[in-house]
Image: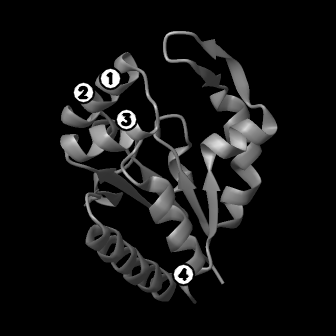
Amino acid sequence: MLLPNILLTGTPGVGKTTLGKELASRSGLKYINVGDLAREGQLYDGYDEEYDCPILDEDRVVDELENQMSEGGVIVDYHGCDFFPERWFHIVFVLQADNSILYKRLETRGYNEKKLKDNIQCEIFQVLYEEALASYKEEIVHQLPSNKPEDLEDNINQILKWIEQWIKDHSS
């Protein structure tokens, strides 16, 4: 059976991982967190002192994921999306959160002041939504609110319906 590939993207702290893991457990699709994949495989290209984090080696990440993506049935979670091949994804969901809620989530993670400020600005200016629109066909890019527990449940149900419909439309 043919299964779709889904990209969950958005500013750090919007709830991609929570949504992705829950979606995978309810849909049977495979969940991949690119940050974890990079950590496990040491898929880095140096270290960013300013942001106090490793720099992702995007080419190695793409090489690492290529086979799984061509098989289908994968949910990918990452805060960037412009380096993934366009052909990989059947749908892209950009999660968004109110700034006050996002600020608290990132503060809880212990982000330094610069990282906090830059991520909040990123959300205000919808940088990742714009990046998704520039990287994929507009009709497959969708925004989802991610502020409260009810949003999570609504998003899961909406995406599960989409998966079900996609499978119907693509079964011969």
Between the C-alphas of marks 1 and 2, the distance is 5 Å
Q: Amino acid at mark 3?
A: Glu
Query: Hey, what amino acid is under mark 4?
Result: Arg
Location of mark 2 (residue): 121
Q: Secondary structure at mark 2?
A: helix
The residue that disc 3 covers is 107
Q: How is the image coloured?
A: one colour
Which quadrant holds residue 27?
bottom right
- Which residue is at 20% across, 42% downward? 100
Q: Quadrant of residue 107?
A: top left
Residue indicated by mark 1: 118
Tell which tag, 2 or 3, sits nearer the viewer. 3
Kindly identify the amino acid type of the residue bearing the numbered disc 1: Asp
Whether the residues at callouts 2 and 3 have beta carbons within 8 Å, the answer is no
Q: Residue furthest right?
A: 41
Picture layout, residue 114 above or below residue 65:
above
State how far apart marks 3 and 4 are (Cα): 30 Å
Q: Crowding at label 1, few (<14), some or many (≥20) Cα neighbours within 10 Å?
A: few
Instruction: Determine which quarter of the picture holds residue 49.
Output: top right
Q: What is the CA distance from the residue labelled 1 to the residue labelled 4?
A: 34 Å
Provide the residue designation for mark 4: 26
